[in-house]
Amino acid sequence: MISIMEANETVKMITQENLDVRTITMGISLIDCIDSDLDRLNEKIYRKITEKARDLVSVGRDIEKEYGIPIVNKRISVTPIGLIGAAACRTEDDFVAIAKTLDRAAGTVGVNFLGGYSAVVSKGMTPAEERLIRSIPKALSSTQYICASVNVGSTRTGIDMDAIRLLGNIILETAELTKEKDSLGCAKLVVFCNAPDDNPFMAGAFHGVTEGDTVINVGVSGPGVVKTALEQIRGESFEVLCETIKKTAFKVTRVGQLVAQEASRRLGVPFGIIDLSLAPTPAIGDSVADILCEIGLEKAGAPGTTAALALLNDQVKKGGVMASSYVGGLSGAFIPVSEDQGMIDAVEAGALHLEKLEAMTCVCSVGLDMIAIPGDTKASTISGIIADEMAIGMVNSKTTAVRLIPVIGKGVGDSVEFGGLLGHAPVMPVNAFSCDAFISRSGRIPAPIHSFKN
């Protein structure tokens, strides 16, 4: 039974501390839509998505009203389109046609985003997957709801450097095609190492081939809740600090569990996982950087930042796994720059740089996320930054990701406004020294020795 005190505590988390269910994401397998005829493939894709997800948005709204829990986004993830379109797509434009079909289906059912315009190429690209990757700039610039991702590495297979070299150019091309919107298309493109099959968060969500036909995954977030809890124990020991974070994460995850089970029951779709990720927003009081300051740092980026983030991430995971038997996705703490006012403040104060963010990704949930860089950054430099992040993920057996936004026409000292949950960001400098000779090598970086566990 839930006590009155616990109910009041949850109400306070929602009304005063920015607790929300960030997303209900329905994963939909498109494997049974595969067809060698492009028109039939598109017809099958549209029909399946609109049938399976027709009640997703309305059910989410009903749960919001009945339980008083904000559900910020309703989303869909689908099987990586690099696989689904392989038999039918002979050209890049064929893949773009699928992107437009997905976009039309997303608009019909009313979701905020649809993820899965993706390829999993950690050991090599098929011709179809390469065509999909090359089609990403046109797909993202001609659709409204579509998000793309490419998994280029894993601990078991190594890193596909050919794909990374290609993606440096693809990111710049996406930036150029969406330059009228401050290169916003790049905010919908994520490059992964060790991408999970059940991630409900965009832009990296896709419905992995290990998943069932349809599933409900829920992402819940509450940086403000954690910060408020830590304000009550200032000056206490690390033991008290860790216990407080862990207990708070448990409570937040239970809210997500309630929403997930209710959505699953009403939609008649199996419950998949809860992803407890402290995902910040530009709202004041909803910042992971502010949690780090509450732990004892003057600014995010100060000495001790990586240790504080490691502590936070670990305790969030420990609290989450005690609250639900099915914790998955990424679960931990996100550190996107543009979406976190505390991170933005740290960058503007000179406390936080790209290199420190890279160090922080060794211990957080994802990686270099929502970072604006000069629009004239070379493609090989972007590829080098991606390679560094992928290496961190590969060697440490964790998910890492890169979402860089080279803002065409802007340089260091400028700021860019994305709006909404995507926030705004100062354009950050990148290392000016060249890695051209390294990136120009063909092939892949082999898996680390500890990958051989059979």
Image (tube, helix red, strand yellow):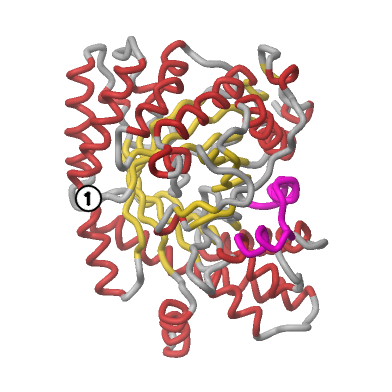
| x then y, percent, for residue 345 | 63, 64
Residue occupying image coordinates x 80% and y 78%? 237
Amino acid on which disc 1 is placed: Gly
82 above or below 218? Answer: above
Question: Which corner quadrant of the image does residue 121 belong to?
Answer: top right
Q: What element carries label 1?
A: loop
Quadrant where the C terminus is found in the figure: top right
Q: Residue at x 46, y 73 (%)?
A: 18
> What percent of the width, then of the height, locates residue 201?
45, 49
Q: How crowded is mark 1: few (under 14 residues within 10 Å), some or many (20 or more)?
A: some
- Please identify the quarter of the rendering in which residue 432 is found: top right
Q: Which residue lies furthest to the bottom in this view?
A: 4
Most extreme residue toward the right is 303
What residue is shown at x 45% (from left), y 44% (from top)?
Answer: 182
Count the labels in the image.
1
Question: Front-most of 46 and 408?
Answer: 408
**Could you tell me which residue is drawn at 35 percent across and 55 percent down?**
24
Q: Where is residue 410 in the image (x, y as percent from the top left)?
A: 54, 43
| Horizontal arrangement in the rendering, residue 201 relative to residue 445 (left or right) | left
Chain part drawn in magenta = 344-364
Q: From the image, which quarter does the N terminus lie in?
A: bottom left
* Location of mark 1 (residue): 110
449 left or right of 416? right
Instruction: Report whether residue 376 is seen.
Output: yes
Does the magenta portion include 349? Answer: yes
Image height of 190 relative to 272, above or below: above
Q: Is residue 206 visible?
A: no
- Return the residue nearer the eye: 321 or 377: 377
